[in-house]
Amino acid sequence: MIKIAPSMLSADAARLGEELQRIERCGADWAHIDVMDGVFVPNITIGQHVVRALRPYSKIPFDVHLMIVNPIKHIPAFLEAGSDIITIHVETTEDVASVLTSIKDGGAKAGLSLNPYTPLETVIPYLDSIDLLLVMSVQPGFGGQKFFPHCLKKIAEASKAIDEVGAHIEISVDGGINRETGKRCSAAGATVLTAGSALFSAKDMETEIRMWKGFPTKEENNESYG
């Protein structure tokens, strides 16, 4: 079954603790928490202090997405704050392997993300070191953007590469995810759908999440992305 990770970027910032509890009640599998530094991406969001403050509100896994430069400097703080998964961007460091090792040595799962126009080949060498591959389907930095359709092929190629090495890696997709694009991403091979505005603006988030979890998987899909 597809996992759903609502993006807290679209939550009511004045009520983050309550919003976190709401997504858990509605059936979310993870809480996706975007950390932006205003350098790697143009926006600035939250840091480890907010992650730590939110941790007591829910037992749901925290999927912390670091869109920051020099990520290795901040890994210990986000581990201490209660992150369950920490994802870095392949574009933000010259020593990806060391950062991934520091995450796993700290007891969290390690994720690696790539921007929409970054070639998939840049993450292939690290497939034996990660638990999550996050494919960005918009240019990171702001919520509410329109999905880039060319990323469907990248998801399918990533799924094939993971199958070839025999690894168990979740493929998450983030950016412009809604009913239509989420269904297409899951069919292409995504196993986690990260979505903000489409879920937080839904009339009934619980019903929406339940619907998304019923999307077809790669094995049930016959569409070609070649």
Image (spheres, rainbow, N blue to C red):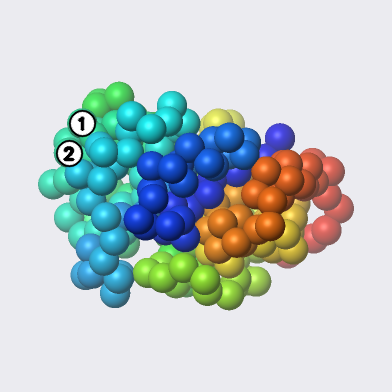
**Where residue 112 sits: x, y (%)?**
40, 48
**Where residue 54 sits: x, y (%)?**
32, 38
Cβ atoms at labels 2 and 1 below 8 Å apart: yes
* Number of numbered callouts drawn: 2
Give the labeled residue for mark 2: 77
From the viewer's side, name the closer residue of 142 and 204: 204
Instruction: Classify the position of the N terminus by image quarter.
Output: top right
Q: Amino acid at mark 1?
A: Glu
Asked if residue 116 lies left or right of residue 221, the reply is left
Q: Which mark is residue 80?
A: 1
Q: Residue at position x 17%, y 38% from top? A: 77
**Where residue 150 sits: x, y (%)?**
62, 71
Instruction: Classify the position of the C terminus by image quarter.
Output: bottom right
Identify the secondary structure beneath mark 1: helix
Q: Is residue 177 above or below residue 53?
A: below
From the viewer's side, name the closer residue of 193 and 118: 193
Q: Cα distance, mark 2 to mark 1?
A: 5 Å
